[in-house]
């Protein structure tokens, strides 16, 4: 009692706020520092509802706002381990360990109705000082964690502040950012500062501007890229409507013979957009050209991990916070600057074309044929490939069979990989090109070269826990806790020690094991058609990249092997 009641209750506040969770609940009465009725209610509910489910659904309850009994279990485990270590080394037991202090501080009783009641006890000044020191050390450790792995600061999902004045989707769990209070109130989120946000403005596209974009994005001329590999950089005057910096009012024409950047505004993510899956990492000056069916989902997850989204394991494609780092949605002047500035690293990964095509068929055609209007009944893999062999007669991407021929109008999941981000024309702009089959080595090397491996890449934890009762189990997943288990793959795109599978291969039910099914689906005739006719240029590039083994390929070094017109 000599310590005074407020001091004792503050201990409880420190622990609840600083240990594994935290949540966004109000822990103390603002006047007396006493736990509020609402806080007690939440603790009771979490204890009753989450104690068992937290073990069944891994660490969700802990990561999204821990409950009391789970925290006491963890501290008891730590105390037990410390006791064993001291016993083996001949040291005396530490009677003031974290677990023992918590046991002295907090005790539980069960009332006549079976409810758990928490009792705050009085502890000595020495124990109080030691406990506070321990909490400061815990806080210091948490500061060393990347933002995405730190304890949740909110128990809800929010649409980013900058979007809140617009008409927003109702499904906040799927479109919003979860467990991060900053996303709800900070107008600069997900950028680090107002200065960084101002450096990468999004395009302000009006309806009249969008109609102008459609002419170039939905009716591109030509309908296929020229595939020159070493095209000269665009200069001022290449476009009749270009301004001094080489951009038009609406779009940046970065490469000749392909649609301009910004087509995502006209095609809603499909159709002709060459840069629609390119993402940027501003602090590292890395622009990564994502290609559908070549691990793009994992890179979008890593992007959200990079800027601190605590729900980064969730399905990323609908999350509105990622819009700010999508190259295709930036202002044309920012796009031009990123493309022309040699300090910016451009990188891409490619994949065995036959394996990618089969993956696209299994995931986007066979499994969804009932939802695809252009499929009348069923379609075999052979029929699908034969459809891709039909010459393109259309001059617009708004009509025709989506599976008919290969052009800018083709679905991005089976459109040739070299159509992406100007790979077919400006391969020299890509400092690094990796192979999906060597994703672990190539990803680590790439992130090391741009300075993102030690800061983010090696800390990435694959997967997470799904909230109990979620309407969509892929929308608001939270990460596993760091340093608590060896069952989760740690390190972006790295492999589990006891498995040959990459962490990237388990993705929301749309990894179809196409590599193992190649022999089943491909006849010699179909394989020849894919390799020598449909995806000839994809095969040229992929074979060169694959031949480099665990070493990243450099675009300029590949050019002489792709075309005799390219300099050695």
Image (spheres, rainbow, N blue to C red):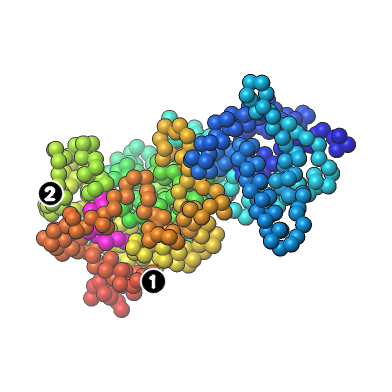
Q: Is the magenta stretch mostly helix, strand or loop?
A: helix
The residue at 59%/48% (across/down) is: 150
Circle 2: is it few (<14), some (14-19), or many (20+) Cα within 10 Å? few
Quarter the C terminus occupies: bottom left
Tell me how many marks there are: 2
Reading the image, the residue beneath label 2 is 383
Residue 470 location (% of width, % of height)? 44, 33
Q: Is mark 2 on a helix, strand or loop?
A: helix
Give the spatial CA distance, label 2 vs label 1: 37 Å
Q: Residues within 10 Å of mark 1 (few under 14, many from 20)?
A: some
Residue 235: give its label: none
Label 2 vs 1, first from the N-terminus: 2
Q: Mark 1 points at which residue?
A: 551
Asked if residue 548 is positioned above or below residue 263 in the image, the reply reads below
Residue at disc 1, secondary structure = loop
- Percent from the top left, x then y, of residue 73? 63, 43
Quadrant of res 213 = top left
Left or right of residue 216, residue 183 in this image = right
Magenta segment: 350-360
Q: Residue, x 55% and y 34% (percent of image)? A: 50
């Amino acid at each position: 009692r000599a310590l005074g009641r407020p001091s004792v209750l503050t201990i409880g506040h420190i622990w609840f706020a600083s240990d594994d969770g935290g949540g966004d609940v109000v822990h103390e009465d603002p006047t007396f520092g006493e736990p509020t009725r609402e806080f007690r209610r939440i603790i009771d509910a979490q204890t009753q509802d989450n104690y068992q489910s937290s073990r069944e659904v891994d660490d969700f309850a802990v990561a999204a706002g821990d409950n009391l009994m789970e925290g006491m279990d963890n501290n008891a485990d730590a105390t037990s381990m410390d006791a064993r270590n001291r016993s083996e080394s001949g040291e005396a037991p530490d009677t003031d360990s974290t677990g023992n202090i918590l046991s002295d501080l907090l005790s539980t009783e069960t009332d006549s109705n079976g409810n758990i009641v928490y009792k705050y006890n009085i502890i000595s000044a020495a124990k109080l000082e030691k406990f506070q020191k321990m909490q400061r050390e815990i806080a210091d450790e948490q500061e060393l964690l990347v933002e995405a792995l730190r304890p949740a600061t909110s128990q809800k999902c929010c649409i980013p502040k900058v979007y809140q004045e617009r008409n927003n989707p109702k499904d906040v769990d799927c479109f919003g950012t979860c467990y991060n209070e900053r996303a709800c109130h900070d107008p600069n989120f997900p950028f680090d500062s107002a200065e960084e946000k101002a450096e990468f403005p999004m395009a302000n596209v009006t309806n009249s501007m969008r109609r102008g974009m459609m002419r170039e994005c939905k009716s591109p001329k030509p309908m296929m890229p020229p595939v020159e590999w070493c095209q000269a950089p665009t200069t001022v005057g290449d476009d009749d409507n270009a301004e001094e910096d080489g951009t038009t009012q609406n779009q940046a024409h970065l490469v000749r013979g392909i649609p301009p950047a910004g087509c995502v505004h006209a095609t809603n993510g499909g159709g002709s957009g060459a840069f629609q899956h390119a993402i940027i990492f501003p602090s590292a000056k890395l622009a990564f050209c994502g290609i559908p069916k070549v691990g793009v989902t994992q890179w979008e997850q890593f992007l959200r991990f990079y800027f601190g989204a605590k729900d980064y394991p969730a399905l990323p494609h609908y999350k509105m916070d990622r819009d700010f780092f999508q190259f295709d949605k930036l202002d044309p002047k920012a796009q031009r600057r990123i493309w022309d500035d040699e300090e910016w690293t451009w990188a891409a990964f490619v994949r065995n074309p036959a394996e990618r095509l089969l993956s696209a068929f299994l995931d986007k055609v066979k499994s969804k044929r009932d939802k695809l209007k252009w499929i009348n009944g069923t379609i075999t893999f052979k029929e699908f490939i034969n459809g891709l062999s039909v010459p393109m007669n259309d001059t617009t991407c708004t009509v025709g069979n989506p599976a008919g021929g290969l052009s800018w109008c083709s679905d991005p999941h089976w459109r040739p990989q070299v159509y992406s981000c100007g790979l077919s024309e400006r391969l020299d702009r890509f400092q690094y090109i990796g192979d999906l089959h060597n994703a672990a080595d190539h990803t680590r090397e790439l992130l090391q070269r741009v300075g993102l491996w030690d800061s983010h890449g090696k800390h990435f934890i694959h997967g997470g826990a799904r909230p109990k009762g979620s309407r969509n189990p892929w929308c608001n997943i939270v990460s596993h806790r760091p340093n608590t288990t060896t069952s989760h793959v740690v390190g972006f795109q790295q492999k589990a020690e006891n498995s040959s599978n990459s962490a990237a291969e388990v993705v929301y039910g749309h990894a179809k094991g196409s590599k193992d099914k190649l022999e089943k689906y491909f006849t010699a005739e179909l394989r020849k058609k894919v390799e020598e006719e449909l995806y000839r240029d994809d095969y040229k590039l992929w074979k060169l990249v694959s031949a480099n083994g665990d070493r990243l390929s450099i675009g300029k070094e590949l050019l002489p092997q792709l075309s005799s017109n390219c300099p050695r």
